[in-house]
Image (spheres, rainbow, N blue to C red):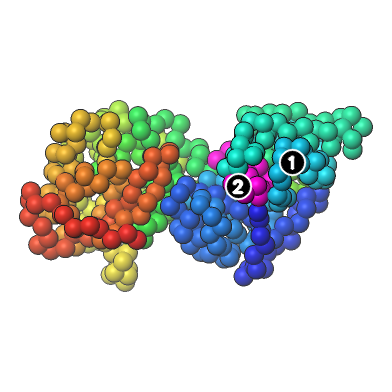
Amino acid sequence: MQRKVILKKKSRPDPGQGLPETSVLVATCAGGMEQLLVREVESLGFSGRVQGAGAVEIGGSLGDAHLLCRSLRTASRLLVPLESFQVGSYDDLYRRMRSVPWERVLPPSATFAITASTRSEVLGDHRYLAMRLKDAILDRQREVFQGTRSSVDRKNPDVPVVIFVDSRGHGAVSLDAAGSPLHERGYRREAGEAPLRETVAAAMLLEAGDPAVVIDPFCGSGTIAIEAALLSAGLPPQGSSRSFAMERWPGVVPPAPSLRSSAVVGPPRIFAADLDDSLVETARRNARRAGMEPRISFSSGDVRQTLPEMISRARDVLRGLPRERSRQEAEIAVVTNPPYGERLNPADLALLYSDVGKLLRQHLQGCSVWILCSEPKLIRRTGLNILGRTPLYNGGIACELYRFRIRPGEGRPGKHSRGRPPRS
């Protein structure tokens, strides 16, 4: 059930003439990203707190929603709460939802669609949950508009409606401000076999702080590299051409599009490589669509060759940076999502991780490494000392983001770290 939060930021007036006023927005995210999302929200000047697994409450109004949709890197959706409730049956739900003034939100000329999820035993069928909500909305419209009602459009609805019921029967109905998920940035029209979600890539980079140079030796279709380029350029993850569902809501006037500059000063600070030549070309095309191609240096080949070469070039770039950069910024970070699971056979995977660990200890002393992986035994093969790990979900797969710092003289080739790593 939604609870109001005390605002720490004065919000702009709500522009939605027909929409109920709200002082709370809810951003959803993949499991493990909640605290990162709170930090993002606060960096934009809003208050935020973890509401529960995969959800963050934001002190803000509908007038703030467009900025949040455009700017949040780790959020999956941004919800505008309409009604909270507690019901014990589908009929109770129907009666409660029919009393909601849907005419303020959904005129008959607008289309809508419903996304339903539930953890309730009593209201456990999400399809029937959605159907009863749809019945309530349409019956309310027929009553208010003399028989006229909206149509359902599941692909591109004007008003996306979201309903969730927890295990105790507490629920909430909200509107999805963005419409399509926020991880769909628009640049990745082509992807590899096991693509990394854009929001997860952004989370990895935000965890890594603000390194001057980023290296991804397993770049695939280029998601980490592109997100790193957007972050280093200070550009929002959503381009100015992206529209949001809320722009079609009653009384909402979208802001004028801002110019998005991809001008580059100096050599690229993002290095990306992959064994698959065709994937590297895919990554280039994706980067071009994002306007980030000039900021990224792509190469192809075996990681045993490309990683030392990229580290060497990164050090050259680092030497040319202004000395006034902070110590945290003036470093190289490897941020990557190597193959795991069924993407290679176990013996090849073990050898790959072992070789990568040796290369990092040999060439990247004094720098940081961030590896996303679902198999701890592969991480142990690197022989690197684990400083921390953060649980993250990528497309429903439970992974962990492992954090390392390569210290001078650390480790010996072939010796694996056996200590239990701390959790962050």
Q: What SS does tag 2 mark?
A: loop
Mark 2: amino acid: Asp
Q: Nearer the viewer, residue 181 or 402?
A: 402
Residue denoted by label 1: 93
* Label 2, label 1: how far apart the Cα atoms are: 13 Å
Mark seen at residue 186: none
Q: Is residue 96 left or right of residue 56?
A: right
Q: Is residue 225 left or right of residue 153?
A: left
* Residue at point 16%, 63% (across, down): 407
Q: How crowded is mark 1: few (under 14 residues within 10 Å), some or many (20 or more)?
A: some
Q: Quadrant of residue 398?
A: top left
Q: In which quarter of the image is residue 307?
A: top left
Q: Residues within 10 Å of mark 2 (few under 14, many from 20)?
A: some
Quarter of the image for the N terminus: give it. Answer: bottom right
Asked if marks 2 and 1 touch (Cβ < 8 Å), the reply is: no
Q: In this view, does 117 lie to the left or right of 229?
A: right
Magenta stretch holds residue 168: yes
Q: Give the range drawn in magenta.
A: 163-181
Q: Which of 60 and 185 is in front in this view?
A: 60
The location of residue 384, given as percent across then percent down, is: 17, 54
Would residue 265 be visible to someone looking at this image?
no
Q: Nearer the viewer, residue 132 or 256?
A: 132
The location of residue 299, given as percent across then percent down, is: 25, 38
Mark 1: amino acid: Leu
First in sequence: mark 2 or mark 1?
1
Work out whether 317 lies above or below 197.
Answer: below
Q: Nearer the viewer, residue 70 or 266?
A: 70
The location of residue 103, given as percent across then percent down, is: 83, 42
Residue denoted by label 2: 166
Quarter of the image for the C terminus: give it. Answer: bottom left
